[in-house]
Image (tube, rainbow, N blue to C red):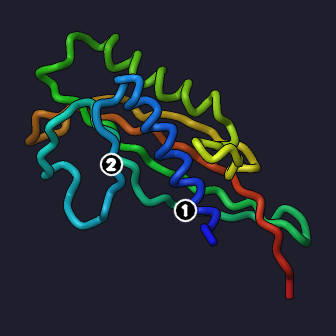
């Protein structure tokens, strides 16, 4: 049985892959945590790299816990392919809209894994020192309600 965290991650990846099919993103990867993202060689840009989330939890009632999974999506662009700041800002807005339009993160599954909703946001964009990359992050805070038994 898939865990809540793996279901949310799979559904976020499905949203990114939909952006890839629309040719908004050229590559989608899931970070394997084995090699520094900025030392990898990428052949297609923009590339979105989905990372492992930070997680917080808050007990909402005596039977429910609201867990928030904060997934960072690192987006890299090749500086030589950037025409102006509007291009980068439009990409950020398009990605945020994709998550706004799927607030419970159904992805391809048809089942909203983030039953408490989600909150997408972005960092600013800027060059990555020592590389030819410009980078920004999309942060998706997915809220999942989990039934608990207090002992």
Residue occupying the point 86% across, 82% down: 150
> What residue is shown at x 69% (from left), y 42% (from top)?
104
- Whole-percent x, y for residue 106 in the image: 65, 43
Q: Secondary structure at mark 1?
A: helix
Q: Is residue 46 above or below residue 147?
A: above
- Label 2, secondary structure: give it: strand
33 lies left or right of 21: left
Asked if the residue under mark 1 is in contact with the one under mark 2, i.e. CB atoms within 8 Å, the reply is no
- Along the polypeptide, which appears first: circle 2 or circle 1? 1
User: For the point 63% across and 47% down, which residue is it?
Assistant: 109
Which mark is drawn over residue 29? 2
Determine whether 20 is above or below 108 in the image.
above
Image quadrant where one finds the C terminus = bottom right
Q: Is residue 148 left or right of residue 17?
A: right
* Crowding near the residue tagged with mark 1, few <14, some 14–19, many ≥20 C-alpha atoms within 10 Å: few
Residue placed farthest to the bottom in the image? 151
Q: Which residue is mark 1?
A: 6
């Amino acid at each position: 049985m898939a865990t809540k965290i793996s279901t949310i991650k799979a559904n976020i990846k499905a949203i990114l892959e939909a952006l890839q099919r629309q040719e908004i993103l050229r590559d989608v990867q899931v970070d394997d945590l084995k090699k520094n993202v900025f030392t990898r060689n990428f052949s297609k840009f923009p590339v979105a790299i989905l990372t492992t989330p930070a997680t917080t939890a808050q007990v909402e009632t005596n039977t429910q816990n609201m867990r928030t999974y904060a997934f960072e999506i690192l987006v890299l662009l090749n500086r030589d392919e950037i025409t102006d700041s509007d291009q980068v800002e439009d990409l950020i807005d398009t990605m945020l809209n994709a998550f706004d339009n799927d607030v419970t993160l159904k992805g391809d599954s048809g089942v909203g894994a983030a039953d408490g909703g989600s909150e997408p946001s972005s960092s600013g964009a800027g060059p990555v020192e020592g590389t030819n990359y410009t980078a920004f992050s999309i942060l998706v805070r997915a809220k999942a309600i989990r039934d608990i038994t207090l002992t």
